Amino acid sequence: MQYAKLYANESGTLLAVDESDAAQELLAGVTLPRPMFEGEAVPHHVARAFLTEYGGKWMRDDGIHHFETNPVKKPRPVPTNPVEQTVTMDWIPKR
C-alpha cells in the first residue's frame, strides 16, 4: 500500500506528498504548511478523498497533480442581514 503525508495551510488548501524519493525532490526549498494527522502518513485512498473534497496539490513520483475544490463545498456569499429560521420542537415525552 502506498502512503502520503497531508498538510494544510491557513486558508484550508491541502498539500499531499508521497513517501517517495521523487516526490521529496519536488519539495526542495518549499516550506511545508501545518501537518495533518499529527504528521503521520495516510493511505493513498484517504489522501485522494481529502483532495477530491477540498482541493489542493499532490506531489507524486510522476509530478504535481492539481485537484479543484468540490463546487458543492465552495462557500456561498452571505447576505448582510440574514434571517434565521427558527424551529421549535417539544422534546418532553407526552404521557
Image: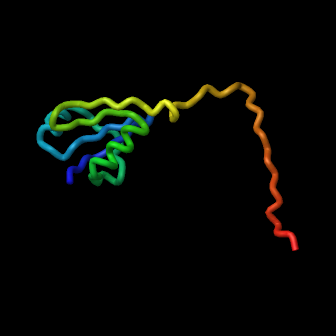
Q: Residue furthest left?
A: 21
Q: Residue at x 23, y 30 (%)?
A: 64
Which is nearer the eye, 95 or 31?
95
Residue 76: quarter of image:
top right
Horizontal placement of 90 versus 8: left or right?
right
In front of the other: 56 or 32: 56
Which residue is more in the foreground, 22 or 94? Answer: 94
Using residue 89 as the reference point, say whether residue 39 is left or right of it: left
The percent coordinates of residue 43 (x first, y second) are 28, 52
Q: In the rendered image, which quarter contains the C terminus? A: bottom right
Q: Quadrant of residue 55?
A: top left
The percent position of residue 69, horizontal first and vertical second, equals 43, 31
* Residue 46, horizontal then vertical, whole percent: 34, 49
Figure quadrant of the N terminus = bottom left
Residue closest to the far front: 95
Residue at the image point whose x is 27% and y is 36% from the top: 58
The single residue placed furthest to the right in the displayed view is 95
**Residue 65 position in % (x across, y down):** 26, 31
Decide: is 21 above or below 3: above
Residue 67 in the image: above or below residue 40: above
| Residue sitting at x 55%, y 31% | 75
Residue 54 falls in which quadrant of the image?
A: top left
How is the model colour-coded? rainbow
Q: Is residue 58 left or right of residue 70?
A: left
Give the residue drawn at x 37%, y 44%.
49
Say how many tags the image has.
0
Image vertical order of residue 17 relative to residue 28, above or below: below
